[in-house]
Image (tube, rainbow, N blue to C red):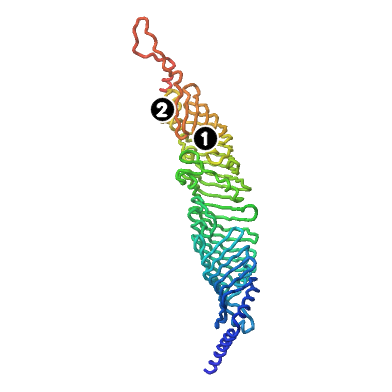
Amino acid sequence: MVLLLRLLALPIALVLLLAGAAMLVPAERLARHAAGAVEAATGLAVAWTGPVRLAAWPPGLELRDVRAEGPGAAADVARVGLAIDPAALLRGELRLARVHLAGARAVVRDGGGLAALQAAARLDRLEVAGATLEVDGAHGTARFRAVELDLRRDGRGTRFEASALTREGAVVAGGRTDDLAALLGGALQPVTLSLRAGGTALTLDGRAGVAPLAFDGTLDLFTDDRLAGLGLPRTAPPEGFGRRRAALVAAATLAPDGALHLRGLDLALDGNRFTGEADLRLEGARPRLVARLEAPSLDLDAFSRRGGGGRSLLVSERGWARRPFQASVLEAADLDVALRTGPVSLGAATVDAARLRLSAEGGTALLRAEELRLYGGTAAGTLRLAPAARGVAVELAADLRGVAAGPMLADWAGVTAFDAPLDARAALAGGGADAAALVADLAGTLEARFATGALHGADLPEMAVTGRAVAGGATPVHGADTRWRVDGGTMSGDVGLRGPRRSFRGGGTVDLAARRVDLRLVPEGGGAAIAVAGPWRAPRVAPEAPPPAAVPQPVPAPDPAGVASDAPVVPAAARDVELMRAD
């Protein structure tokens, strides 16, 4: 028992000795030694104007009204608490083991303060309470209030917990690494980091480096506030592309040259989900994104009139939309994005499957529809967009094969008149500040060929024979050909209809800007010509005049005997027409 008491007395005596030795050192002298140690480790010159107080155990001191300043960093601290490592004192060294900062106001510019962070990484513990921090960088200034930090180092590595307030709300972060000092010195270290800001949550788990910034591991990101909690500019993506929420999980590699590589990417944007891989590079005049993506389906209803409350970028309830095109979007980034998707919904319109490729370079974008399966047929083509003095310049080349024209025209244009398989080819170009101006400027050619089907809403052969407009009915068609030249938003061309009863040839104009048609169809073999005029959704279809055989003839004069006949005189030609109708 006596031996045990002696063994316990030895460390107690050492503790008392160290405490007494610390108390014997003048406070100002000890503070100068501590300030010198800080300056040697961080490059920050330390000065104070307030009182200095010694602490007995653990040995240390407290300074008031401290100013620390160096290249790229400066701080004013109301109170600094310094705890000295007792074991180092036994070796004749002055080592700070723990630092507590209260009421600090710090400013960091141009990436400064790294040496201070490296020095803090060698502490056993760093505590910050009630601080404000301002960080000036190439992309602006970030300001943090009510900053709280607790950084601890032990044999298992370094852990930290931090929180702050920004203009957007609260930010909470935490993480760990094996060796924080080595990480800040440029070595790759295992890192786990979690961040929560507003409706955004980010988790990184892998290996990271700081100088230069690099990462290799798993990235997990979720946001329901469009990353606004991180202080990024507020955006308003359309529904289906992150307007309500977005989630990303991927194996991520941030290379030392700043390129971000995502593999095994799983991206959810509202109800749309994409998988694949992507590479993002930020150097150069604009960011460059290369991606290969797949989607089981795609909801683009937000781009339709139904999803847009009766409006879209192209059309509105009163005609073509006059919402200005945002040509600056084309210059935001260079792109090479390939997408393969299953069914695509675009309001009432649908596409069964699509293989698309979007490229953008120097502000000019090219969308290639490598394959579209829609309405029982296929389509392919290109759409080129480029900024222009008058808004956006557009070039379209499209080729449709075997498409069911009836459902497609009903869904895409609200036209229900024609139902037959369709082959078509278009080459159009134009420009304008909005959809209305673009359509009014279109020029090019359009060809269409319809197979066997029907023209609904009118019986053209009946009208040609009788010369009377007949509501309803249908016209069987064994084929139709149309060829148009487009100039200034107006289509001018020829139309040919082949049918089992009558065939028609004719032509006219289609005013794309006003969405009106003005056509004249002449029956082969004689009869009344048919005029089709009015809004293209519901044009008026009527014969221009009765056929010659059906024109009423004058009643002959009374016969010489003066006896008038009660029976009308019907010319032979009219009787022949009536017999043909009976047949």
| Residue type, mark 1 in image | Leu
> Does residue 402 sit above or below 355 in this rendering?
above
- Mark sitting earlier along the chain (2/1): 2
> In what element is the residue under mark 1?
loop
CA distance for labels 2 and 1: 27 Å
Residue under the image location 56 percent in, 76 percent down = 81
Direction from residue 560 to residue 351 in the image, left or right: right
> Label 2, on which residue?
470
Residue found at the very far front of the displayed protein: 49
Instruction: Indicate the position of residue 349 as horizontal and vertical percent values.
Output: 48, 43
366 and 342: which one is in front?
366
411 and 497: which one is in front?
411
> Does residue 409 sit above or below 278 in this rendering?
above
Task: Tell us which disc is closer to us: 2 or 1.
Answer: 1
Direction from residue 146 to residue 567 in the image, left or right: left
> Label 1, on which residue?
512
Taking the image as drawn, is residue 357 in sight?
A: no
Count of numbered badges drawn on the protein: 2
